[in-house]
Amino acid sequence: MTIKDIPLREKCIIFIGFMGVGKTTIGSEVAKKLYRDFYDVDVEIEKKYGMSVKEIFNTFGEEEFRKKEKEMIFKLCEQRLNIISLGGGAFLQSEIKERCLKDGIVFFLDLSWDSWKDRISMLIDSRPILQGRTLEEIEDLFHSRQKIYSLHHSRVETDALEIEEIANYIVDSIKLAWDLYEPHK
Ligand code: S3P
């Protein structure tokens, strides 16, 4: 059986979006509701190399981090049924984007700049990409990154919703897609 034959119900469910939009929180909630395993790509990289993402950036540089990121995502995409949260820069690599769109169901978690900017202080210490930038530069990065998320299977605007509501909405829409496109015989 080739990878193309993966039934919709067994495909990985993948979360994309900018740093700190809630991919890990929402992804793990969805995983619980679907009784599936959840993987945060950054956490898996940190476990594998015994270093934080920040240490990997500082020691080896961003390019090396991106290689490790691609390797880890490809490994997680090879297995069925996983729920995966990607780092906010993963879709900068077109190979990752193509692979995820082909082998997974990709949800883009879309949070507005106005809501996101209140989270900066919680994120800055652990996100090397944000460090050393002014607020204006971070805002430019936020807006310029939106185009890498523009290819997805479903977009969820999360500004006005609680985590539980978002997770329920996603689970309902996945089940609807399964029943529509791959009904039980
Ligand atoms: C990055 C996002 C981070 C992490 C790394 C780089 C980015 O993941 O992969 O710091 O380039 O946007 P989160 O989106 O989970 O914060």
Image (spheres, rainbow, N blue to C red):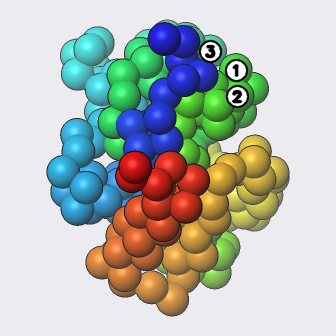
Q: Nearer the viewer, residue 164 or 170?
A: 170
Residue where numbered disc 3 is placed: 63
For marks 1 and 2, give the CA distance: 5 Å
Q: Residue at x 52, y 76 (%)?
A: 158
Numbered disc 1: secondary structure: helix
Ligand 1 within 8 Å of the CB at mark 3: no
Return the x and y of residue 172 as percentages of the image width and height: 41, 71
**Disc 1 and disc 2 in contact, CB within 8 angstroms:** yes
Please indicate whether residue 161 sits to the left or right of residue 38 in the image: right
Task: Answer whether residue 78 is visible to the viewer in this image.
Answer: yes
Mark toward the viewer: 1 or 3:
1
The answer to which of 163 and 3 lies nearer the viewer is: 3
Report x, y in % for residue 42: 38, 33
Give the residue number, with chain letter if any, for mark 1: 95
Q: Is residue 161 shown above or below 141?
A: below
Disc number at residue 118?
Answer: none
- Determine whether the residue tagged by mark 2 lies in a helix, strand or loop: helix
Q: Report how far apart the C-alphas of labels 3 and 2 lie in the structure.
A: 19 Å
Residue at 47%, 60% in the rendered image: 179
Amino acid type, residue under disc 1 in the picture: Glu
Label 2 packing within 10 angstroms: few (<14), some (14-19), many (20+): few
Q: Amino acid at mark 3?
A: Glu
Residue denoted by label 2: 98
Which callout, 1 or 3, points at the residue further toward the start of the chain?
3
Q: How many marks?
A: 3
- Given residues 159 and 175, the one toward you in this image is 175
